[in-house]
Amino acid sequence: MLPVLGIYQHYKGNFYQVIGISRHSETLEILVAYQQLYAGFGLWVRPVEMFLETVTVDGKRVPRFKFIEEHLAKAPLVS
């Protein structure tokens, strides 16, 4: 499963926009490219498995990044 392009909320509260899905040029690992939607608007990449994993917060399992809404036009993600 791959994340859709759009807005996500990190379990700590900040919002991010997934802007693309790519592959590492050497390992072919699938990576999620996303931009923070606050101070500095930095760009980040994270392995897809880590982006989609759940974390434990106050004894409860929650998604690391919770999908909020689709935002960007659909585009081919990974082939």
Image: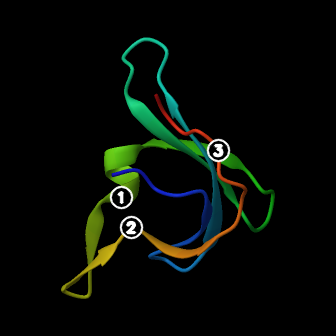
Q: Are marks 2 and 1 in contact (CB under 8 Å)?
A: yes
Q: Amino acid at mark 3?
A: Ala
Of all residues shown, which one is farthest toward the right?
40
Name the residue at 46% across, 28% down: 79
Q: Amino acid at mark 2?
A: Arg
Q: CA distance from mark 2 to mark 1?
A: 7 Å
Residue under numbered circle 1: 52
Residue under numbered circle 3: 75
Residue under numbered circle 2: 64
Q: Nearer the viewer, residue 41 or 72?
A: 72
Callout 2: SS: loop
Q: How packed is label 3: few (under 14 Cα within 10 Å), some, or many (20 or more)?
A: few
Q: For the residues carrying marks 2 and 1, which lies nearer the camera in this image?
A: 1
Horizontal side of residue 26 vs 14, given as left or right: left
In this picture, is 34 found above or below 25?
A: below
Point out residue 25 in the picture as x, y percentages from the top left corner: 49, 15
Name the residue at 52% across, 58% down: 4
Q: Amino acid at mark 1?
A: Leu
Point out residue 40 in the picture as x, y percentages from the top left corner: 81, 57
In primary-sequence order, the first of circles 1 and 3 is 1
Of all residues shown, which one is farthest toward the top?
26
Tell me, what colour scheme is on the image? rainbow
Point out residue 45 in the picture as x, y percentages from the top left corner: 54, 41
Name the residue at 34% across, 50% down: 50
Q: CA distance from mark 1 to mark 3?
A: 20 Å
Q: For the residues carrying marks 1 and 3, which lies nearer the camera in this image?
A: 3
**Number of marks in the rendered image:** 3
Name the residue at 41% across, 50% down: 2
Q: How packed is label 2: few (under 14 Cα within 10 Å), some, or many (20 or more)?
A: some
In primary-sequence order, the first of circles 2 and 1 is 1
